[in-house]
Amino acid sequence: MHFPYCRSKCAYCAFTSSPDFSTQSKYIERLKTEIAQTSNKPKINTIYFGGGTPSVMERGYLAQIKQAIDRYFDTSEVVEFTVECNPDSVDEEFLRECKDMGVTRISVGLQSASDECLKAIGRAHDVSKFISAVKSIRKYFDNISSDIILGLPNEKEGDIEKAVELFCELGITHISSYALTVEEGTPLKASGYTVDDDAQADAYERVVKLLKQKGYERYEVSNFARDNKISLHNYKYWTGANYYGFGVSAHSLVDGVRYANIDSVTGYIEGAKKTAIALTDEDKKEEKIMLAMRTARGLDLNDFASSWEDLREQKKEQLDKLCALKVVEIKDGFLRATDEGFYLLSAIITELI
């Protein structure tokens, strides 16, 4: 479920979002209409409310959408329900609403443990506000996810260590660590800012090492968890499972067909139709490689061979080269990236497809 409202636009953000809260009521009604068009009451086991910033929605709206989901989906086996929030919009009423509608997991954005960085990218909170928000969240939830972005303006070498220490002190169970990409159309791009690729690579290496030392296991190229609290919902994207997306810019994948909603809030509210693209067999094959290689588990070569081809034969030359470079390994029938290979994943995938 995509809730596209934000109090302000972050300098790096290229997602569809709106600061015009006056359209929230119409948006919620349109969202209910879209959910109601789902047929056959599919069985689901995870729910994710993302954004934008779900926590800035008028109180009661999130619960209305959960009620619509319960009506048009079989939610009897839901084991994970995540809601995203920003530190500046967390309050007791929001947390009680989440608890009452069965949320099991909260994702709260940090981005950096440096107030200087946060100010440079236009975040509406500082580090102290993040700490306060997490302490409030912990009164209701013990499964808390957060994230950092590597390569931000004003980032200093010690900021990574500060962030990891902060996550540990606050008992954060899941961490996403993203390498900044300066997207077209963002304030960061307009400012002329560019990422120092070497420094970003060094930061990535440090964060992986530090998180491992602190007991976090990397289960996907950018995601780490301890106490086995991986994001069950996001893991579906990397394993090719069906998923249903609702709201502006939302995507779905249902039985080999990819659906996409318009990326305009106004257009969505006015009822613009989804686009639908049936994946070809070649699309499915390439996505299987691309997505599986993002995970620590890797690509099941025997399973892949049963549907397409045996890469150990068809890509023997490429695999021999990649193994010699120690950026991939083949073990117990799985092809997976090594720690060194994860940062070179795009190049590895290009070799394989």
Image: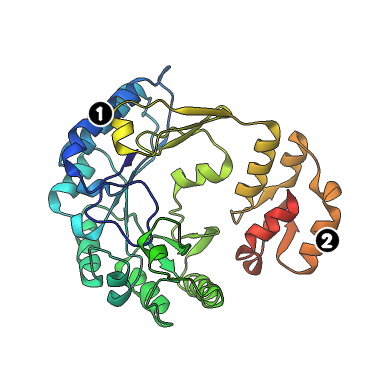
**From the viewer's perspective, is 205 left or right of 59?**
right
Secondary structure type for disc 2? helix
* Front-lying residue, 30 or 320: 30
At x 39% / y 77%, what residue is drawn? 155
Q: Quadrant of the N terminus?
A: top left
Q: Position of residue 173 (x, y in %)?
A: 38, 60
Above or below residue 166? Residue 28 is above
| Quarter assignment of residue 285 | top right
Tag 2: amino acid:
Asp
**From the viewer's perspective, is 171 left or right of 135?**
right
* Front-lying residue, 283 or 96: 283
Tag 1: amino acid:
Gln
Q: Position of residue 166 (x, y in %)?
A: 33, 73
At x 30% / y 38%, what residue is drawn? 265
Q: Position of residue 154 (x, y in %)?
A: 37, 78
> Which residue extends farthest top?
40
Whether label 1 touches label 2, CB < 8 Å: no
Check disc 1 and report the residue beneath it. Answer: 67
At x 51% / y 63%, what residue is drawn? 217
Check disc 2 and report the residue beneath it. Answer: 320
Residue 180's mark? none
Secondary structure type for disc 1? helix
Q: Quick one: label 1 or label 2, which is nearer the N terminus?
A: 1
Q: Residues within 10 Å of mark 1 (few under 14, many from 20)?
A: some
> Can residue 332 be seen here?
no
At x 66% / y 65%, what residue is drawn? 341
Q: Position of residue 202 (x, y in %)?
A: 54, 77
